[in-house]
Image: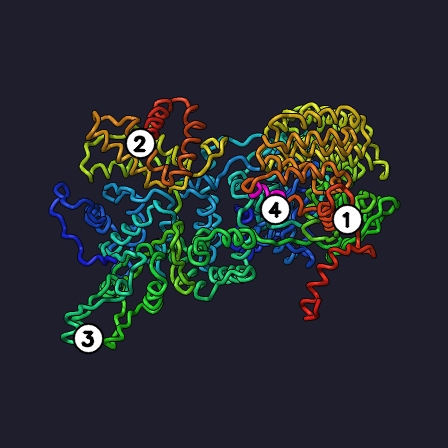
């Protein structure tokens, strides 16, 4: 007896297709279900019945020893394929996967996105500019009506697809292989004696599987001798967000949250419940939404649907109604609704018995070695990298950071700049397991994956600061294989980069790493050459770069000068003695340079004892002479003092210079500069200010005034006593 | 505090119209009649057209017997559908947007298409009183006869409620808040109580309110949340692309030229494009290719300004020139539109002129014309 074959062409991740499919399966009661999924997935399908398996989940197929070659096949609650799987497992009906095995498709490395948009063509013909809307109107929304024959929907789809494909050339390449594989499996099912065969595949493939199937020999010839690799498969949790980002198999879906809602509310009023959920979400974010708003929005959505001739309100109608009625046109609430509801925050989970990806397995091992348990509760830990456990922990957390799995977030160490102490905040979120899965495309172990990821990021990074951060990360995570290429790229970028400020910003962290590298036992010898190159370039380009700056740029430039000097001191570089001071002198002596920058350069020269106090005093007096406008002089003072008045306390000559300059200002100029000077002097330490005040109030010869003591000035005391006597009414 | 009292008398024929600017229902009477005859869909009570036909009228299209409907609003279809759908429900419609984005235009055409009458208009100003929303009194009669129905002078809102038509309120946010709140009862209970007579006016089916408001000006009175709740808001955006804006401008300049009886000089397409580009760049603060960022002028540089600059150029060319619109005709208008604040905007304009216009290929003539316009 010939088997009866039912072809159910579905739209991937379409809730209406899913509902129709379930009703159709109930009607037909097949004894085998053929699913468009790679053959290797068959043994894993029994896990789908496990109650711990909660969609969205994905099937992961990867090359066994090269996990970076992988393919994902996501399923959501509302995916018709998932509905088919659940139906079959609940009815104890066999499920066979009939698509091209992953062993073949991963061997060639071709993408699986179908090249022809059949739905789009049909929608075009029907006059819709959006294929999703067309499919919704024609198939999805109609399926909510229980009177409609589910099977006839699929027959109509089959007819439409046949008509579309009649005009297309025969498929070639991977498409042809896949359809050949599907046909072979269909023949095998017929031969195996099944009576009612249900085929669940993408609507586009239905005409290829319709009778007559043609010669088996042609298909067998196509499938003979294909390249194979060893492939492993497993289930992994997935998120709605990644479903919306259209990665993996077939076309992504842009509104998984909406589809999940429609599927859950099947047959019932989905519009009002949707708006109720929007109201709950907006109220959480302190946006007032009253029941009247909801009534207005529902009515508007339904009216829009009627006006547009649609059987019920779809996503566009509810979005428009929410925008007009709930959000009063503001975009903020809309973005919130889009993110949290239309796309949704759902994360799936897989049973504990699923085989793990190699990276996840390695992570468990590493977590044991580091004695760190993943915990959903947030906690802070302090790590001392001098200890071996501490070092292991620090490396693990840095490596995960490089993989974009932020299990630990680094906190700034309290106060101490010694780099053997680190503070991290640890928190494990379910999203991270998905991130780990995606990162498994980079390698089988945490170390290998982190190395690959850093190298990849270094190829795409353009800013020097990003590259420096990557070098730091590679060194902190102890990834020697990533260090060399990243440093090379950094050096190359530095050679091309004309922006001195970026070079100076990159210098400080590199110096830090170079200096403290020995503490961590990392090898940073290649860093030294890069550092040299950087320093040479900085010194060469300092003059012209700092020539003409406005106020904001000058302030940051002065800070950069200080940071560079500190970095040079940290590594005790040879340039400290010659190259760098000469560059500073060039900046200090430059006419027309901004006062803050020049003042800071002079200060740095004095601090490093390259210039004596006399030279500094001469420069200061030139800068504060009558010819310079008062604000320029005040800027000079600000740059020179650099946030601390210590130099004034110890050098009375400089104090006198500034003092006399201040005294020489006339009223108008003083008013001009008082705000600037107040800002400068206000940033000093309280003790310094007090001492400065005492100094200035003293006799002007640098001697501190006498503290309270027993030597009294009789003249001044007599005058005071007279006044006291007057107050007390005593006769003098 | 003017209240539009009587509709303008209907002109006999379109080519001997004596008024400067006919109402939408007069100017497009032919189209409206054609759409009404062709419309088979269900119409809400007292609506002249079905909602779908109203959208066709606004966005342009074709009737079944081939008559072309000109587009009145060039922009997103979904926005217009939301606006019309709102008027079907019991909520009122609030059109927001910066000046020059066709809010008043859309509101006039909506009222014309739905009720056939766009003259029930309340103009909101800082001095608008309650009489504009509710009712006033014929004081002579009031004093002689006492309060009576005959002594009442109904506002457009009251007249709209009685006849089941669309009422338009312009510049809702410029009205004082206590006058705005007089609308709350009207919109929620659809009744207007008249306490002096102990009676009320209940709205007939087909009554609704279209309000426009401008969110950019100073001196606006924000709507209270109780009032805001009674409106569905539609924000009309500026044209998204330069092509859209050029299309709008071209059509409107031609229509305005006809209305002002200027000789039909088609402004050169490149002139339109040039002015549109200048205004878009100064509006967005960045050049079209995104390379250079610019200071933003304090003037509102919306599509309406482009239209008026080009219309002025056409007028100059027609009456003072040789019939061909030249660069000089346009340049003076552009400078005048961009520079509203003499100190800040002249800096902006000068930077733009020297930084962008001077180096653009093919704009040399505009550069010289603008320099001389700015100097004179």
Residue, disc 2: B332
Label 1 chain ID = A
Mark 3 and mark 4 on one chain: no
**Label 3 CA crowd tier, 10 Å (few <14, some 14–19, many 20+):** some
Label 2 chain ID = B
Q: Nearer the viewer, mark 2 or mark 3?
A: 2
Residue closest to the eye, B339 or B141 = B339
Residue, disc 4: A242
Q: Closer to the N terminus: mark 2 or mark 3? A: 3
Q: Determine the residue positioned at 42% across, 38% down.
A: B344
Residue, disc 1: A705
Q: Which residues are magenta?
A: A670-677
How was this image coloured? rainbow
Residue, disc 3: B147
Query: Disc 3 and disc 4: Cα gap in Å?
Result: 70 Å
Query: Disc 2 and disc 3: Cα gap in Å?
Result: 58 Å
Q: Quadrant of residue A470?
A: top right
- The secondary structure type at the circle numbered 1 is loop
Query: Disc 3 and disc 1: Cα gap in Å?
Result: 92 Å
Residue A409 in sight: no
Mark 4 and mark 1 on one chain: yes
Residue closest to the eye, A324 or A566 = A566
**Label 4 CA crowd tier, 10 Å (few <14, some 14–19, many 20+):** some
Magenta stretch: helix, strand or loop mostly: helix
Q: Position of residue B347 (x, y in %)?
A: 43, 34
């Amino acid at each position: 007896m010939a088997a009866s074959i039912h072809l159910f062409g579905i739209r991937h991740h379409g809730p209406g297709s899913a509902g129709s499919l379930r009703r159709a399966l109930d009607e037909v009661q097949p004894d085998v279900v053929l699913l468009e999924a790679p053959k290797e997935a068959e043994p894993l399908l029994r896990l789908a019945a496990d109650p711990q398996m909660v969609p969205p989940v994905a099937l992961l197929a990867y090359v066994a020893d090269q996990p970076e070659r992988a393919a994902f096949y996501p399923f959501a609650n509302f995916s018709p394929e998932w509905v088919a799987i659940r139906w079959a497992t609940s009815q104890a009906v066999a499920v066979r996967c009939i698509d091209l095995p992953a062993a073949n498709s991963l061997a060639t490395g071709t993408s699986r996105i179908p090249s022809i948009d059949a739905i789009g063509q049909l929608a075009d013909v029907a006059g819709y500019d959006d294929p999703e809307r067309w499919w919704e109107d024609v198939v999805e929304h109609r399926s909510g009506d229980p009177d409609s024959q589910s099977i006839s929907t699929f027959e109509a789809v089959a007819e439409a697809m046949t008509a579309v494909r009649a005009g297309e050339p025969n498929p070639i390449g991977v498409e042809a292989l896949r359809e050949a594989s599907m046909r072979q499996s269909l023949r095998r099912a017929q031969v195996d004696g099944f009576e009612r065969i249900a085929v669940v595949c993408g609507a586009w493939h239905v005409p290829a599987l319709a009778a007559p199937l043609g010669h088996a020999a042609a298909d067998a010839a196509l499938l003979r001798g294909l390249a194979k690799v060893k492939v492993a498969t497993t289930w992994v949790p997935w998120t709605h967000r990644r479903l919306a980002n259209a990665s993996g198999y077939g076309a992504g879906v842009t509104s998984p949250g909406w589809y999940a809602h429609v599927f859950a509310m099947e047959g019932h009023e989905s519009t009002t419940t949707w708006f109720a959920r929007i109201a709950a979400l907006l109220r959480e974010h302190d946006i007032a939404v009253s029941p009247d708003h909801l009534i207005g929005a529902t009515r508007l959505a339904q009216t829009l649907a009627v006006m547009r001739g649609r059987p019920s309100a779809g996503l566009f109608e509810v979005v428009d109604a929410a925008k007009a009625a709930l959000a009063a046109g503001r975009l903020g609430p809309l973005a919130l609704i889009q993110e949290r509801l239309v796309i949704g925050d759902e994360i799936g989970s897989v049973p504990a018995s699923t085989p793990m990806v190699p990276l996840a397995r390695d992570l468990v091992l590493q977590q044991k070695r580091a004695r760190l348990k993943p915990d959903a509760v947030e906690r802070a830990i302090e790590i001392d990298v001098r200890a071996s456990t501490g070092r292991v922990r620090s490396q693990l957390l840095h490596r995960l950071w490089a993989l974009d799995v932020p299990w630990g977030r680094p906190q700034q160490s309290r106060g101490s700049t010694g780099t053997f102490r680190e503070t991290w905040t640890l928190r494990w979120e379910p999203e991270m397991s998905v991130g780990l899965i995606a990162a498994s495309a980079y390698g089988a172990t945490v170390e290998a994956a982190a190395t690959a990821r850093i190298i990849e990021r270094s190829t795409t990074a353009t800013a020097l600061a990003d590259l420096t951060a990557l070098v730091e990360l590679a060194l902190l995570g102890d990834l020697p294989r990533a260090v060399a290429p990243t440093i090379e790229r950094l050096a190359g970028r530095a050679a091309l980069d004309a922006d001195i400020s970026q070079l100076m910003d990159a210098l400080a962290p590199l110096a830090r790493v170079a200096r403290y590298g020995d503490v961590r036992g990392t090898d940073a010898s290649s860093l030294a050459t890069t550092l040299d190159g950087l320093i040479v370039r900085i010194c060469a380009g300092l003059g012209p770069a700092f020539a003409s700056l406005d106020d904001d740029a000058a302030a940051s430039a002065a800070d950069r000068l200080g940071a560079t000097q500190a970095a040079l001191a940290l590594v005790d570089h040879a340039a400290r003695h010659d190259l760098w001071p000469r560059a500073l002198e060039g900046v200090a002596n430059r006419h027309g340079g901004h006062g803050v920058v020049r003042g800071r350069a002079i200060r740095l020269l004095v601090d490093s004892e390259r210039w004596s106090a006399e030279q500094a005093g001469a420069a200061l007096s030139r800068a504060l002479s009558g010819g310079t406008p008062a604000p320029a002089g005040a800027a000079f003072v600000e740059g020179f003092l650099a946030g601390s008045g210590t130099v004034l306390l110890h050098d009375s000559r400089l104090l006198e210079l500034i003092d006399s300059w201040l005294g020489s200002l006339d009223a108008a100029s003083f008013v001009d500069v008082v705000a600037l000077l107040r800002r400068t002097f206000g940033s000093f330490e309280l003790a310094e200010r007090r001492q400065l005040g005492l100094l200035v109030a003293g006799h002007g010869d640098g001697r501190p005034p006498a503290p309270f003591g027993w030597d009294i000035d009789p003249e001044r005391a007599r005058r005071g006593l007279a006044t006291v006597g007057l107050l007390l009414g005593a006769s003098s | 505090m003017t209240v539009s009292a009587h509709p303008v008398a209907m002109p006999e024929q379109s080519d001997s119209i004596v008024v400067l600017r006919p109402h939408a229902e007069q100017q497009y009477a032919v189209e409206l009649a054609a759409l009404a005859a062709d419309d088979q869909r269900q119409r809400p009570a007292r609506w002249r057209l079905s909602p779908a036909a109203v959208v066709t009228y606004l966005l342009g299209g074709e009737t079944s017997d081939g008559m072309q409907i000109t587009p009145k609003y060039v922009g997103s279809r979904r926005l217009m559908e939301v606006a019309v759908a709102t008027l079907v429900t019991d909520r009122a419609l609030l059109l927001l947007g910066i000046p020059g984005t066709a809010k008043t235009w859309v509101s006039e055409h909506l009222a014309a298409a739905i009720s056939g009458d766009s003259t029930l208009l309340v103009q909101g100003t800082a001095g608008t009183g309650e009489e504009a929303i509710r009712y006033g009194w014929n004081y002579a009669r009031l004093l002689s006869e006492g309060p009576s129905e005959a002594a009442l002078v109904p506002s457009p809102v009251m007249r709209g409620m009685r006849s089941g038509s669309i009422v338009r309120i312009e510049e809702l946010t410029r009205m004082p808040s206590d006058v705005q709140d007089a609308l709350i009862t009207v919109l929620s209970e659809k009744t207007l109580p008249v306490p002096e007579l102990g009676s009320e006016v209940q709205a007939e089916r087909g009554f609704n309110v279209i309000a426009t408001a401008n969110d950019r000006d100073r001196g606006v009175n924000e709507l209270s949340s109780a009032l805001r709740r009674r409106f569905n808001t539609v924000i009309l955006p500026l044209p998204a692309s330069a092509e859209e804006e050029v299309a709008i401008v071209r059509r409107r300049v031609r229509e305005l030229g006809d209305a002002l009886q200027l000789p039909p000089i088609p402004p050169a397409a490149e002139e339109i494009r040039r002015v549109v580009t200048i205004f878009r760049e100064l509006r967005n603060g960045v050049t079209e290719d995104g390379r250079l960022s610019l200071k933003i002028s304090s003037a509102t540089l919306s599509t309406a300004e482009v239209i008026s600059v080009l219309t002025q150029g056409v007028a100059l060319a027609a009456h003072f020139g040789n019939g061909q619109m030249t660069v000089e005709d346009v340049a003076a208008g552009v400078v005048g539109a961009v520079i509203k604040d003499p100190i800040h905007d002249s800096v902006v304009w000068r930077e733009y002129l020297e930084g962008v216009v001077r180096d653009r290929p093919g704009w040399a003539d505009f550069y010289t014309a603008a320099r001389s316009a700015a100097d004179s």
